[in-house]
Image (tube, rainbow, N blue to C red):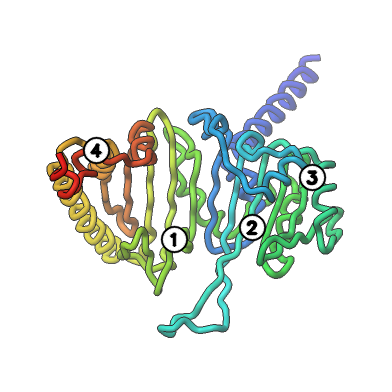
Amino acid sequence: MRKRTVISLIIALAVFLALGFAMYLRAKAPPEAARLLPECDAMVYIKLKNVRLATHFDATPVTRTPYFQQFIDATGIVPERDLDEVALAMHRVPTPLPHKHGDPVAEIYTSEVFVGRFDGQRLAKYLAARASARESYAGVDIYTVPSDDQTLRVAQLGYDLIAISNMPQAEQIHSMVDRSRASGLSSPGSSLLAAHYHDVPQLPLPAQAWGIGHIALPFSQNGYINVMGLQLPLPEDTDLVASLRYSGSIHLRVEEFAPDEDAAQHTVEALTAILDLMRGLGAEHLQAQPARDPSAVAMHDILSSVTLVQHGKRAELDATATSDELKALSAPHHTTADESSTPADTSKH
């Protein structure tokens, strides 16, 4: 009797440890939506459910195009209400046409995974009515839907999962279907995710949004990253890990993975010089104003929060912004009476 009790306890303990280990692995693993993405040059993940709870952006009225409104009416999917997670992969595909300066031209294509609440039957009916072709792959219907000047391939991977790709070939959508059919954690995701997901900050709180890889692809021009007309001292193929966390205020972190310590030091020094210049111009602008512009004050405070440090081969940028500061930046600018008056107007009074 005692022997049987000991065996039962050992079995119960083994099951408990196995469950605990599985839960630990699941907590450390990337989100499923990100694991389903195909091989790519960069990826971005946003946990919209948490962002919605923090900002209530779903309560803000949205102006939609007639085409998009038809999609909502037909499927019942309201993105700001029904989407909980979005994972997006970017693919750089070279084209044979040269740039006027001799640089090769590359097209940026995307693949996405959406997690949320969908009416599968209504969605399938909508896609079937607009698809130019339909393929059955691994038991999943893949719809080819013309959209403007591109072609979308759409597949419903589960009751709460939708995959989309606008790549010219079907390889990427097939990859997402294959990954969705793999069992849970046995699908580690793309090589990019496996290489850098552990660099995404998880403490003190997991990031609500993050991106890894050559995430400057949309801002690349002539081999470098250009933001708002400003060329940053970073090649366009620089590996970056960026993250956003919200805990009363928004915390941005961007890490560059440089080839060596000298390159990381150069990045910090160059960005520090640019940051000092921007801070100086912002301070002069504030001093020259008769009335303090809330957006200028907010930009000054955000720039003041930015720190740049080097950790070996890594260059790290951190910045924080409050909700009020972001609202001030996004609010329309209204000129004061003094700013809007011209000499001609003044002479009339």
Identify the image quadrant of the N terminus: top right
Q: CA distance from mark 4 to mark 3?
A: 50 Å
Q: Looking at the picture, does residue 321 appear above or below residue 311?
A: above
Question: Label 3 amino acid?
Answer: Leu
State which tag comes first along the sequence, 4 or 3: 3
Numbered disc in front, either 3 or 2: 3
Report whether 231 appears left or right of 104: left
Label of residue 111 in the image: 2
State which tag comes first along the sequence, 1 or 2: 2
Residue 251 visible somewhere in the drawing: no
Name the element at disc 3. helix
Q: On the image, numbered disc 3 is attached to which residue?
A: 123
Q: Residue at x 54, y 28 (%)?
A: 53
Name the element at disc 4. loop
Q: Residue at x 37, y 57 (%)?
A: 256
Name the element at disc 2. strand
Identify the image quadrant of the C terminus: top left
- Give the percent coordinates (x, y) of residue 205: 45, 33
Q: CB atoms at circles 3 and 2 under 8 Å apart?
A: no
Q: On the image, numbered disc 1 is attached to which residue?
A: 216
The answer to which of 300 and 44 lies nearer the viewer is: 300
Q: On the image, numbered disc 4 is attached to which residue?
A: 336
Q: Residue at x 49, y 47 (%)?
A: 210
Q: Looking at the picture, does residue 1 appear above or below residue 39?
A: above
Question: Label 1 amino acid?
Answer: Ala
Numbered disc in front, either 4 or 2: 4
Residue placed farthest to the front in the image?
Answer: 348
Question: Label 2 amino acid?
Answer: Ser
